[in-house]
């Protein structure tokens, strides 16, 4: 594509920044309503027919899996200063499709209690909307993304509509852990996921490559490029490799006038529009607002509350794995088929919510086992047999509460390939998260031990892995002194600037966020449409 193909469009109703699922869904929804839409995306397009080759590259042990989508380097530089390291370059992707290019695809709804943390428990803050306000949009999002699920979860929030597709059946190793849970009076159920259990929306059924994370070559797993293609078929224009450098506002500071973006040759252009939607994920969205500071807004755009970048949350991820004396007969599945939400709707304020999922992990691949052993001949065959077949494991996602000191700021000393300060991430865990983690880890150990496994790894409670679900950095609220966007997701400060991202979550619960992002985005698109 030549630089001129990336020239600004003359007359545009809506400029969307970011082409992940949020950007794709809002672009499609508004283009479908007849509006002229331009999407500006920092990363490249990734043609569908390249994905098989990308999967093959991932399977060779010489290649790190972050190479599959080209994460890292000066473009993606960042610094991490909190009590737990934040691994940004394995938790977000820049490209058409966004981070869902390598997500796993679980799509549970938040529970009603997640919207009412202050009124129920005296913790954190309530959302300015309730579960019932999002309920129709959740159903719309499940249909738009294509969710396979079953109504077998006794702890699930209320729903009226069936899932668009049937759930995936439980795996072989699920049956081992399920039997242990039965002994412990723990109810196990299926996992709703945006992965085709049958042909859906022109995409094939899952064919079991088992490499969903980092790449699904068949297109059976939903990713944001699905809605970008739909938006383009409705007339939207999508420019790739055009990172937006800053947003510029009118002399009064009431409306955004233009998004200034850079093309690969280094030229800057101004894209004007009547409405702007920032959909850059929960790290780059606050960063872009902070980079857009001006004389009227010296602390950054839409930041009169001082909340831009603050209240960064993630889900705390804990793995507990073990070995059985007997082979499990498990194949590498690539996604989980059974979980329990039994511990989600807690009674006391602390410990809080978590859920436990069963990992369909078969152990290291034969190639990894062979190369890792260093032996030859019969020795290596014996080593491979030992390492394959007896693994069993669980993961828990744990709720973390918002804390103003857990935040994204601009690094004062390091810049990216365009000379902009890189994001500095200060991620803290907090006492509530740690106490909840201890209960989650104990529950995971109990399940594995009841199954007869010897536990060989448990993530320490004080040092969680990132759930790859950053949230909270442009929080939603009714009070402009405390929050960045209103319940329509429009910024309090600028009348034509909307944010579509998990960055608007006031609290994050412990459920994977993307279905909620999609539901909120569908709702926000209606409001933007009404304003046009
Ligand atoms: C390993 C992994 C597993 C996951 N599994 C799950 C799961 O099972 N379930 C779940 O719900 N979630 C999961 N997630 C999280 C999920 O991927 C994200 O919640 C989702 O992608 C967020 O969508 P988004 O559109 O808000 O942001 P993103 O998908 O991050 O998209 C943002 C886009 O904006 C672009 N952008 C950023 N800055 C600029 C700029 N200045 N100019 C132009 N473009 C810009 C980026 O390049 C990117 O393409 C997982 C994430 C990871 C990393
Ligand atoms: S298991 Fe299914 S969803 Fe995962 S990579 Fe294979 S085809 Fe795609």
Image (tube, helix red, strand yellow):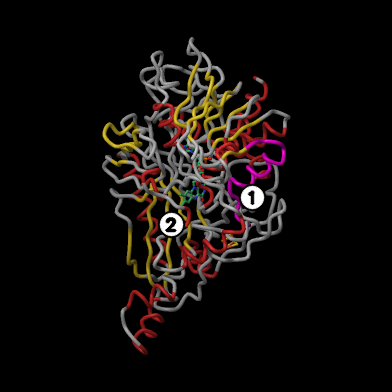
Quick check: 479 left or right of 6? left
Residue 228 on the magenta span: yes
Return the x and y of residue 501 as percentages of the image width and height. 51, 35
Q: Which residues are magenta?
A: 220-237
* Image quadrant containing the N terminus: top right
Q: Which residue is mark 2?
A: 67
| CA–CA distance in space, label 1 to label 2 | 28 Å
Return the x and y of residue 272 as percentages of the image width and height. 57, 23
Q: Most extreme residue toward the bottom, as rendered? A: 378
| Relative vertical location of residue 274 with respect to residue 412 in this rendering, above or below | above
Quick check: 227 left or right of 391? right
* Image quadrant containing the C terminus: top right
- Label 1 SS: loop
In the image, 159 versus 147, the foreground residue is: 147
Asked where in the image residue 216 lies, by quadrant, the reply is bottom right
Indicate if the residue with disc 1 has its beta carbon within 8 Å of ligand 1: no
Mark 1 or mark 2: whose residue is earlier in sequence: 2
- Label 2 SS: helix
Question: Measuring 57% from the left and 66% from the top, which residue is drawn there?
Answer: 209
Residue 278 on the magenta span: no
In the image, 429 versus 523, the foreground residue is: 523
Return the x and y of residue 66 as percentages of the image width and height. 42, 55
Question: Measuring 27% from the left and 40% from the top, which residue is drawn there?
Answer: 81
Q: Nearer the viewer, mark 1 or mark 2?
A: 2
Q: Is residue 13 visible?
A: no
The disc placed on residue 147 is 1
């Amino acid at each position: 594509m030549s630089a001129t193909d990336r020239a600004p469009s003359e007359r545009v109703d809506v400029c969307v920044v970011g082409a992940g699922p949020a950007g794709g869904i809002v672009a499609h929804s508004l283009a479908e309503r007849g509006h002229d839409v331009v999407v500006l995306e920092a990363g490249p397009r990734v043609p569908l027919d390249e994905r098989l080759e990308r999967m093959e590259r991932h399977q060779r042990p010489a290649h790190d899996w972050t190479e599959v989508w080209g994460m890292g380097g000066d473009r993606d530089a960042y610094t991490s200063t909190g009590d737990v390291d934040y691994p940004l370059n394995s938790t977000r992707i820049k490209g058409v499709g966004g981070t869902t290019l390598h997500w796993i695809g679980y799509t549970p709804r938040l529970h009603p209690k997640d919207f009412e943390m202050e009124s129920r428990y005296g913790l954190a803050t309530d959302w300015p909307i309730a579960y019932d306000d999002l309920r129709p949009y959740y159903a719309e999002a499940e249909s738009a993304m294509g969710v396979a699920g079953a109504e077998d979860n006794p702890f699930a929030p209320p729903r009226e509509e069936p899932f668009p597709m049937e759930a995936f059946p439980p795996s072989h190793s699920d049956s081992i852990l399920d039997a242990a849970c039965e002994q412990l009076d723990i109810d196990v159920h299926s996992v709703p996921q945006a992965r085709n259990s049958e042909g859906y929306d022109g995409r094939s059924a899952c064919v079991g490559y088992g490499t969903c994370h980092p790449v699904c070559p068949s297109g059976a797993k939903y990713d944001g490029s699905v809605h970008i293609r739909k938006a383009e078929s409705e007339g939207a224009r999508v420019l790739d490799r055009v990172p937006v450098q800053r947003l510029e506002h009118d002399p009064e500071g009431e409306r955004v006038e233009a998004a200034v973006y850079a093309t690969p040759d280094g030229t800057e252009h101004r894209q004007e529009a009547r409405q702007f939607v920032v959909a850059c994920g929960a790290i780059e969205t606050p960063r872009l607002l902070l980079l857009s500071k001006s004389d009227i807004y010296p602390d950054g755009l839409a930041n009169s509350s001082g909340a831009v970048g603050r209240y960064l949350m993630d889900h705390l991820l804990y793995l507990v794995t073990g070995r059985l004396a007997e082979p499990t007969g498990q194949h590498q599945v690539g996604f989980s088929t059974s979980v329990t939400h039994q511990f989600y709707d807690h009674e006391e304020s602390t410990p809080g919510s978590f859920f436990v999922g069963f990992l369909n992990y078969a152990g290291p691949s034969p190639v990894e086992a062979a190369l890792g052993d260093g032996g030859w001949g019969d020795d290596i065959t014996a080593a491979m047999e030992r390492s394959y077949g007896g693994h069993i494991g669980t993961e828990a996602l744990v709720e973390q509460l918002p804390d103003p000191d857990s935040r994204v700021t601009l690094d004062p000393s390091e810049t990216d390939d365009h000379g902009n300060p890189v994001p500095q991430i200060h991620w803290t865990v907090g006492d509530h998260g740690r106490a909840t983690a201890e209960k989650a880890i104990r529950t995971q150990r109990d399940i594995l031990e009841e199954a007869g496994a010897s536990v060989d790894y448990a993530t320490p409670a004080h040092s969680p892995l990132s759930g790859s679900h950053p949230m909270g950095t442009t929080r939603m609220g009714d009070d402009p002194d405390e929050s960045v966007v209103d319940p329509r997701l429009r910024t309090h400060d600028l009348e034509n600037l909307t944010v579509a991202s998990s960055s608007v979550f006031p609290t994050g619960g412990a459920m994977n966020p993307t279905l909620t992002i999609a539901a909120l985005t569908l709702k926000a698109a209606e409001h933007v449409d009404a304003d046009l």
